Each structure stands twice: as C-alpha cells, then as structure tokens.
Image: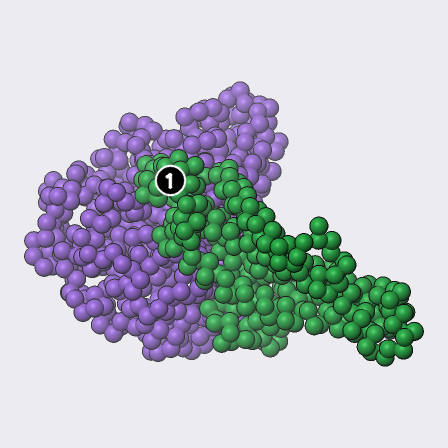
Chain colours: A green, B purple
Amino acid sequence: MSLRRYAARRLAIGAVQVLAVVTVVFLLVQALPGDAAVALAGDNPDPRRIEEIRVAMGLDRPPLDRFGSWLWGLAHGDFGASLISGRPVAEFLHDGLGPTLVLALLALVLLVPMSVLLGVLAALREGGPLDRAVTTVTVGLHSIPEFALAVVLIALFGVQLRWLPPTAVGADLLAEPAVLVLPLVVLVARPLCSISRLVRAGMIDALASDYVRHARRLGIGVNRVRFAHALPTALAPAVQQVARTTDWLLGGVIVVEAVFVIPGLGTTLVDAVAGRDLPVVQGLAVVFAVTTVVVNLVADLVVFRLAPRSVAIA
Amino acid sequence: MHSLNRRNFLGLTAGLSIATLTGCGTTDSGPASAASTPRDGGRLRAAFAGGGAKEVLDPHLANLFVEAARSKALYDKLADLGPDVSAQPRLAEKWEADAALTRWRITLRQATFHNGQPVRAEDVLASYARILDPNRAFRAKSSLALIDLPNSRAVDERTVEFALKRPFVEFPNALAAFGTYIVPAGSEDFTAPVGSGPFSFVSFEPGKSVLLKRNADYWEGAPHLDELEFVIANEESARANALLGGQVEYAHDLTPTTARSHAAGDRMAIHRAPNSAVQAFAMKVDRPPFDNRDLREAMFLLADRPQLVESVLAGSGQVGNDLFGKGYQHYADDIPQRTRDLDKAKFLIRRAGAEGLTVKLDTSTAAAGMVEAATVFADQVKGSGLTIEVVTGNKDSYWADTLKNGSMSSFRSGAMPIETHIAQRLLTGSGTNVTKWARPDFDALYDKAVSTVDDAGRGAVYREMQRSLHAEGGYLMWGFADWIVGAAPNVGGISTAPANTLDWARFDKVWLG
C-alpha cells in the first residue's frame, strides 16, 4: 500500500473515531446530574425559573433531537451556539485555541531540540558524569507534578524574587512574552525527561547495532555514522512520545492554565462542563478528537520516513 | 478538580455583608500609606473569578460576582441596598406609595446614559418589561413579578407610576433587587453596552478582561479612577499571586488562609466585610426525621458554633443564632444567643425516639467551606446518640438537588433584605423553600408585615416571625463569614459593605494613592 493510500485510510478511520468520541461525550454529559438550566440557576434553583430557562435554551426538546440537529449543523461546518451566552461555539474554540497553540508550539520548539540534544549527549557518554547528571536532573523533574512545580516556581521567581510575572492575568501572551516563561518551564519539564530518555536508549541501541558497525567498517566518519545513520533510527520511538506530548499540549493543560491564568482550551472545557453547556463541550470534543487523530497520523508518517522498517504498513 | 473552576454564583441568595452598619468593618492595612487621601487618575486592575462561556455584559443576565461588579460600574438601578441591607434611592430620587400601597410614584434623578440621552421614565418601563418578558428567564423576574406592567405608566419624562398586583410596602426592595438595572429602551445588543453608571464601556474579551473608562458626567460625581479593568482569574491562588506580583491592584474573594498569611506583609492590604455570607445547615421540616421539632432543637443545641467559625472560617467570621441577616434592618438581635448543650440535646434525641439513628447530611463544594463545615458538625454530633453521615454531591447541580431531595443539607447565602429572604425561602409558595417551612399563620404574618406602613409596627411583625423561626425553624445558621478582598496598599476607598449591596465592589469610590 502506498503512503498516500495509507494516509487516506487512516483519515477515514479517524473520521469514524471523531464521530464516536462526539457521541460518547454527548451521552456522558447527558448522564451528568443536572443540565445547563440547573447549572445556570445555581443557588437560586426555583423550579419555575429552571423550567423557564430550559424552554429559553431549547432544552425541552428531546436529547436525540438536539444531538441530531447539532450533528446536522456540524456536517455543514456549524458548531452551534453556547446554550448560556448564545455566542457561537466557533468563537469559543477560536478564543481558546490561540493561547493553547502559542503554549503548545513554543513548548515543542523548546522541547524537541533540547531532549534530542540531551539524549544524544547522554548516549555518547554512556555511564559518564554527563550521562549521570542528565539522568538525575531529568528523572528528578519528571517526578514533580506540574501543579507542584508551578506553585514553587511562582512563589520563588514570581512573588519572592519578582524576576518574572507570576501569572498571565489579562496579558496578551505574544506581546508580553515574559508571562510565558514560567508556564513553559512547567510544561517542558516532564516531557523533557521522557523524550530524552527515549532518545538516549534509542541512540545506545542504534550505536550498538549491526548496520552502524558495518558503516564504521566501511570507514564512514564517526559523526556521519552517528548523526546520519544512527540518529534517525534512534528518534523513531521518541517521535511517538512527542506525538503523545503534542496531543496533551493541544488539549489545553488544565492545571497550568488555571494556575497561570491562561484562558486556553482546557479552561474553556472546564467551564463548559461545569455549566453543562453541551454545544461547547461537543465542539471541544471534535477539536480534541481531530487533533489526536491528526497528530498520531503525522507521527506515524514521520516515523515511516525516519525508519521505514519500524512501521508495519499492512 | 473542583477548585479549578470554583465559581461563585451570586444570586439574590449569594452575597455578603453588613459591615458599615455595625461599624466593625476592618482593614488590616499593612503600612500606613498614601491610600488615605483620595487622588484622581490611574487604571485599577481588579481580578475576579469568571465564568468563561457564561460571561455576558447584559446586566439582566448577570449571575456571577464579576458580572454583578461590572453591571454596577456600567449601569444603575432605581434603588440599591445600603450597609444595613435596606433599600436606598439611586436613579430614583424618591418614591411615594398611595394609601393602599398598590400604586407607587417614582421620581427619577436627572441622569444621562453614556450616549448622552437622558434616563427617562420610558427607559425604566422598557427595562422592566424586558426583565418580565414571559418568554425569557431573567433572574430578576421573580423580584419584579408583582408589578402590574400594563397598568403602570410614564407620567412624564421623569416620573413613573407603578401599579402593583398586591399591597407591598417593601417595593423599594424589588427596585434594589439583583439584576434590576435600567438600560436604554430597546437595548438588545450588549456588545458595546450603554448604561448610566460611573464607568463607560471600552472593550471586552470574554473570559479574560473588560476595560471601562471614567464617566465624567456621572450624576453622583465622576469616579477617581481614569480606567477600570476587570480581569479573570478563577483560581484564588492566582488572584493572590497576581496581586503580590503587582499584576493587579484588587483581588476579589480571597480565603481566610490567604488573608492570614499576608495580613502582616507590606504587599497586600486585606479588607474584610464582617457578617457577610451566612453559613448554615438546612433541615427539611416536612419529612422524617426533622419533622420532629425536638430533633431540630437537638441539632441546634449540638452545634458548637465558635468551633465551627474557628475551624471552617479560620476565625474570619462570627457565630450565628439560627436567624438570617445579622446586623441587617429588622434583625431580631434581642433573641438570646444559642450555645451548645449536649445533655439537653441527648435528652431531646431520646424523647424524639431517634437514638441510634443515622442521618445523611448532603454537602458539596458548590460554596467554599461547606464540606469542611459538614465534617466538623458530624464530629460535634458524635456522642449524642445520633450519627451524621456526610454525603458529598455534585457541585454543579447541588442547589437544585438539595431543594428537592434529602433531609439535611449544607446551605449558604449572601446578603439580601430579611423580607426577601422570607419571601423567597420561607413561605408556602416560595420558589426556593429548602427547609419546606410552610405555615399558613406564618404566611399571614408576612402579608401583615408587607402591608404595615409604620416602620416600628412592621419591625415588630418581622421579630415575631423570627422568634418562631428561631424556636422551631429548619435553618441551623451557625455563622457569618467575612468577605475578604485583597488590594495593593496604595488603593483607598474600599468599602467593607457586603457583596450584593451598593458599596461592595464599588469602584467609583476607589482611588489609587
């Protein structure tokens, strides 16, 4: 099967997966106690008022009917409107996607070169002081959960030393890049460990492999062997991990968004679920499902290019 | 995960306050600073919890604290609640009722909207008609439902005559109710809202920020600030950090723990509004086991209120006496304070035949401190012969769930006039009657109170009603939490009045020193 046909088939399967995710999400939100009217009425739950809100939101229509018309709209590129504010869901997605993309892209730009560099350096000096230092630091960072690291960094660099802004409250992320420093450190810390460890292990394996030994016997330069022959193979397993990390970042890392006040997709999702704002939750489910499918497809294609034999394309 | 999106529904029910009245408003200001002399100019950034998808600038849809604070900056109501939570004239210069208390003549102040148009009687009628629209579900609808709109009229540009469906001497409470803002007639698009308030609109990014600027022509005098920016930070720690890091000058709704740890520092001034949100347990009197009066009294006597205030509110509050509205107008402060009496409680539990009984106490994280209070109370009940089992429910549907189900639940409420509290929660036909207190004689007393013109006479009826609630009602109101706001030390003019009242989050009186 050609790469193109493989990709097309994966995309078709992906579309089915997205549909399944959206249906499951709809059913799950239906199963939650209370609906948007109850959530909106809050601590003033006068049953007459809840009923009025329900009618005003169109929640008196049967759930299947609402799901059907939402799907119909989606097929026409219309994500619907928020039950609560009446604003188009597309607007929510657009507003939340900006900060999430900025964070995700910058995190990846830092993460990928750094973890490859650290992994390769550690592999080339396997067992040496550098390898041990890199291992200690990255494993140490990996064992600290995001929220704990965030709290410590904010208390130290944001509040005590005042070197960096403690939150991004009200800030335009790109116009004031200083607000991004702490969130990026927190986002990069844990994946840096997992990815650099994979690169290190892959590199050690590759350097010990038959084809590298063969290349050396042919008299090819050390650096050429390392970087043109061993490295691509070594990267293949790491690519899958980068894909998982990318997916995680694009989902909006809720803890980081909350602590640093970055109104991205994670915050939008938490708000929408708490408000039982189904159209917004559904819209986000579509975005997250599509992201996952596409990111994984891209990762597989990249791995195929790097190390054709490592992916079985049936 | 709950704390990530903790949001405080304000509502007529939630809110806070009372400080100025009792004179016990306190400000633990760090250094004596420039905050004492009013100064004009500058931009104040105020951090509030927000609602993302829910946030709107339509003042009739407002629901959250941040929306209430923004509405107040952009708009006016005819009346608003003073420090003792009684209605004070605002856009209404004065009000007069006829002898039957069913026709009210309101004279409007000379005020203008931000677009230069005067505030007219027609705008008032149109605003109320919008709120009362049968096809919509605005929060203030029930407060204004007693207005007979077809028979109300604009007498002239600045005089409105309201016809009421029944005699109601507390009509000004309705004019001051949550969300009863006056908008220009025909307003439907609130993307660039036009009001008559002390600040006018500049820009809005939902879930992120709103920027307003000084309205130099405000009828009560221009604000000190040039600009006011509301920013959203849902996490309490983020609001505190942003304040400490100099990113905002005002952080709304801080926890007692944060207040305690920063009160002594010089980076944050803590402003408390004492006797604010009431904290309670609601017992349903229409079903076992709390249809038994002895058992209700036993619960009242089991609560160790000072311990609850100390542990749950971290000392930032005062004990309650099972009555709503401590310090508010008409509060029955002559009723002796209840204290813990384990022996009497044991006796009452035996007499009620409830020994060995296990009662479920429903709670949730829908409001701060509720789960903690339920846990502490369950502990206090140990050894009485009765057991309390704390059940934590879903926070998003909590208030609707506990209105219908269970027999005992955590409860909290902000400031509102005592009359409103009774009307919404304690009459046979009340929409949010959690305790299911439904007594014809009590309903009759309410009708009597709201048709008694004489203040003292009306006060006496309210006291009688409170005596019966104190003796055998379903609310165990154990404490009143302080409302806590943090500000930069150079911010002056922050009132210690309760949320939901006029002076809470009132930025036209605030300045940057």
Picture residue at 45% right of the left edge, 70% below the top:
B249
Q: Residue B377 sits in which quadrant?
A: top right
Residue in view at x 27 percent, y 59 percent: B189
Q: Position of residue A229 (x, y in %)?
A: 80, 71
B221 on left or right of A128? left
Task: Report the amino acid beneath label 1.
Answer: Leu
Answer few, some or many: residues within 10 Å of disc 1's Cα (few below 14, many 20 plus, some between 14 and 19): some
Between A58 and B512, the one nearer to me in the picture: A58
Quarter of the image for residue B204 reads bottom left
Q: Which chain carries label 1?
A: A
Q: Residue at x 58, y 75 (%)?
A: A164
The answer to whether residue A86 is seen in the rendering is yes
User: x and y percent of residue B208 in the render?
Assistant: 44, 64
Residue B305: image location, x then y, percent: 51, 43
Residue matched to label 1: A59
Picture layout, residue B386 above or below residue A157: above
Q: Which residue is drawn at 36% across and 60% down?
A: B69
**Secondary element at image label 1:** loop
- In front of the other: A146 or A66: A66
| Whether residue B502 is situated above or below residue B353 in the rendered picture | below
Near-viewer residue (A100 or B37): A100
